[in-house]
Image: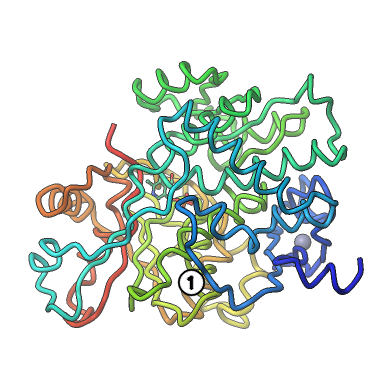
Amino acid sequence: MAAAARRQIGVVGWRCAVCAAAVDISTPLVFRCPNATADDPYHALRIVQHDEPVAVVVDDPNPFIAYRPHFAWDSFAAANGLDDSAREALVRSLDADIAAVAGTGFFVTPFARADALSTALGFTADGGIWIKDETHQVAGSHKTRHLFSALLALLVTEQIGAASWRVTDRPRLAIASCGNAALAASTLAAAAHWPIEVFVPPSASPAVLARLGELGAVITTCPRLPLDPPGDPCVLGYRKAVIAGAIPFSVQGPENAWCLDGGRTIGWEMGGADRPDHLFVQIGGGALARCAVGALAQTGPLPKLHAVQTEACAPLARAWKRASRGEGGVAAAAHHWREYMTPWVDVGSSAADGILDDETYDWLGVVGGIHASHGAPVIAKETEILLANELAREHTDIDASHTGTAGLAGLLAIRDVISNHERVGLIFSGIRR
Ligand SMILES: Cc1ncc(COP(=O)(O)O)c(C=O)c1O
Ligand SMILES: [Zn+2]
């Protein structure tokens, strides 16, 4: 590609954090590292940004329009000949279709100081708690931000004639999730008229299942079977579907790297004048924290990342401990994936049931973010998970689930080491259903 054309592009490609394989951004159908196999899935593509530091200008209410030059999907489309107006038109028309299904299109969500909560937790006027309220985002959580970029990349692939399927005979999208991600994926799939299969646990809530049905998703329930290998049975079901030809429509970076692209919008939106000193993020598969901290690093100084899990399931905290004590320390974690990030056996129960992922799939990005920011993992007690949600309900008007307020539980767990003058960022996501 000509150097002049290349300079227009925000993202130049992908690089694997494990094996350093590089893939040019113009390459279609890149979901995983080219060296990942069924026996060696331990690879993780990262976005190689060209226009760093990213200068975030919010000149449109839709983040996918406002930040368009910085996205991997946009660079992929540009590198394959889609002009600027065609790329913008794609976002606008898909967003309108999403609004027709979900009642709202994408928007830059508020990131505001929660005054009453800050006072209740003893912060002074110069410090306090800032909350990113994602409960009114498309499908009620931030998960759609991840999946919108994945969907845009698929639609671009079709437009440039690089799809390995016929548009009239699209393979199913597949995703494993117990709640918000399945709703997000099914909402976007409905808007794009794309068939989707969701792999859910038997514990999935009737309200979620009913909505998935309304959206036209094929629902496959995946109980834990005695002879299954360790790990989440929903992920096992999803992987089998992908091997059989389904498209990985996952919010796990190692499964579909495109989800990391749109996921960064949440971090770009927290990097303005209210940039926090500390960021507490609830960790399930880890994509949210990884994207938030990665995006904040692209725009300025990093807040300390506190990666919050529950006592019921804390594979990230365990991996961090293993890496800290291991050969080469945390910086060498990528070379020890199999030893450090192992599935949690006997996952317990928690009111924050959306973050009980057996494995933190995007652990490398989270561990890297903790390391770079001098943060730490936090394990919240169940009493703190419950109290956090009560405090959120009492002192804010955001109606988030226990999963969505679990970051606050992490703050409660280590409140004594955070100064009253510091600024703490939280992400309340996942509207209560
Ligand atoms: C509301 C909410 N917050 C946070 C998370 C954690 O995101 P991730 O799985 O990317 O770590 C989830 C995941 O399901 C969620 O539903
Ligand atoms: Zn690799």
Residue 124, by quadrant, is bottom left
| Quarter of the picture holding the C terminus | top left
Work out whether 268 lies above or below 94: below
Colour setting: rainbow
Q: Residue at x 83, y 57 (%)?
A: 79
Residue ID for mark 1: 296
| x, y percent for residue 272 | 40, 73
| x, y percent for residue 117 | 13, 61
Q: Residue at x 60, y 80 (%)?
A: 331
| x, y percent for residue 263 | 53, 55
Q: Residue at x 13, y 78 (%)?
A: 125
Q: Is residue 120 left or right of residue 32?
A: left
Disc 1 marks a residue whose amino acid type is Leu
Residue 21, by quadrant, is bottom right
| x, y percent for residue 94 | 60, 36
Work out whether 118 lies above or below 106: below
| Quarter of the picture holding the N terminus | bottom right
Q: Is residue 60 left or right of residue 204?
A: right
